[in-house]
Amino acid sequence: GRFGEAEKELRGMVVNKGIPEGVWVSAVESYFQAAGAAGAETTKGVFLGLLGRCHVSAGAAVTVVHRVVGDGVGGEGAMVRAKVVAELVSDERVVALFAGEAPAKERTAMHAVLWNCAADHFRSKDYETSAEMFEKSMLYVPYDIENRILRAKGFRVLCLCHLGVSQLDRAQEYINEAEKFKIHLLKNDHNGAITQVQAMTTCLDFTPDFLSLSAHESVACRAFPAAVASLSNLLNFYSSGKPMPATEVTVFRTLVTILTQDHGNESEVLKYMKRAHARLNELGPDHFFGKGEVGRRERNWFAVNLWNSGTRTGKEKNYELCAEFFRLASEFYGIMVDGEVEGGQCDGLQITDIDCVCHNS
């Protein structure tokens, strides 16, 4: 087919030493744009074949890698493209193009391309591909004082990637270079883990993804106080408007679910329920809960859990908390989602009666 002819012409360039860089770079870009992920291996082969035969600059390498990586994990053959790029950028001949001070700008650009690719795979929970791309990006970070923060950032995300696929031995390699969060969890040192969570948010390279995965690991280790600390800190970043690893309502729901695992957390549950209600009023039901059936289901979850907490604290004769839970349940039941209000078991008259009983007991 036409791709076969184009591939033949590209490979013909490899044996021709006189082709200007701009010409073959343009040819490689055009070929890959037409062939897509299926042409990734050919693109890599042609590029490596040109090394040593034609003039190849660091800038040309960045251009080709950027073209092959594409614009995010949603594109065609994202994993195939990432694999080919990983092989290409780790070739010692390619790495050598970026040695020294002259290509500093191109080295920074290459690191950014690889880092962004890794971050895209991380967000899509493809931790293995993410780890590989983060590792390759480290090849383009010099070992000097100026770049130590960038290297620490790399070690930290590599640790999280390996935690994500439960490769604890690999994670520990990187955790020794960055945070010791997992070690605290495995030792049941909840206070130490919480301290690490708090320290994590002060790092210059911090991203909310760290807190999300830390919460996941804490729950897996049944270190619920550390999970609560991670999620509570995560809530502080939603007002920034930046992309977040989970919806805000999901974080609140997860927090409440974790807190209700242990008896005696009723005051904390109420605190986060009130905070959720405040954010609901601030954002509106559609933005906080979501629309349609999803929104109704989220609203009902909060209302039912508040009602159940009120019932439970009432049975325990904790009437003050009982009244607070029922009053808030009434608020959630009364929220309109897509023009519908959940009547359910909780209406204004019942709440008034319950409130009177609680405060007169």
Image (cartoon, grey):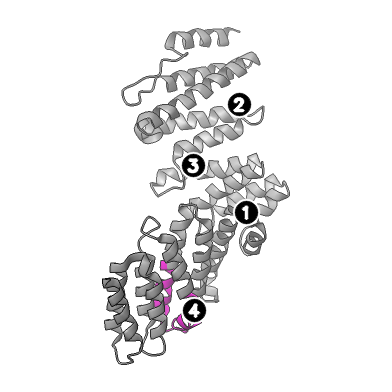
Query: Which residue is most to the bottom?
Result: 18
> Which is nearer the N-term, disc 2 or disc 3?
3
Does 211 appear in magenta? no
Q: Closest to the observer: 278 or 161?
A: 161
Q: Nearer the viewer, mark 3 or mark 4?
A: 4
Q: Where 111 falls versus 49 (above or below)?
A: above
Structural crowding at the residue carrying mark 4, measured as other residues with C-alpha within 10 Å and reported as few (<14), some (14–19) or many (≥20): few
> Which is nearer the N-term, disc 1 or disc 2?
1
Q: Can residue 105 be seen in this view?
A: no
In the displayed structure, does residue 221 sit left or right of residue 108?
A: right
Q: Give the range drawn in magenta.
A: 89-113
Q: Where 32 falls versus 281 (above or below)?
A: below
- Residue 287 picture location, percent across and down: 36, 36
Q: Quadrant of the N terminus?
A: bottom left
Amino acid type assigned to the residue bearing label 2 in the image: Glu
Amino acid type assigned to the residue bearing label 3 in the image: Leu
Amino acid type assigned to the residue bearing label 4 in the image: Asp
* Residue matched to label 3: 235
Q: Which residue is drawn at 72% across and 46% down?
A: 188
Query: Which label number is shown at residue 91?
Result: 4
Q: Closest to the observer: 353 or 20?
A: 20
Q: Can residue 286 be seen in this view?
A: yes
Structural crowding at the residue carrying mark 1, measured as other residues with C-alpha within 10 Å and reported as few (<14), some (14–19) or many (≥20): few
- Residue 349 picture location, percent across and down: 44, 8
Alpha-carbon span between mark 2 and mark 4: 57 Å
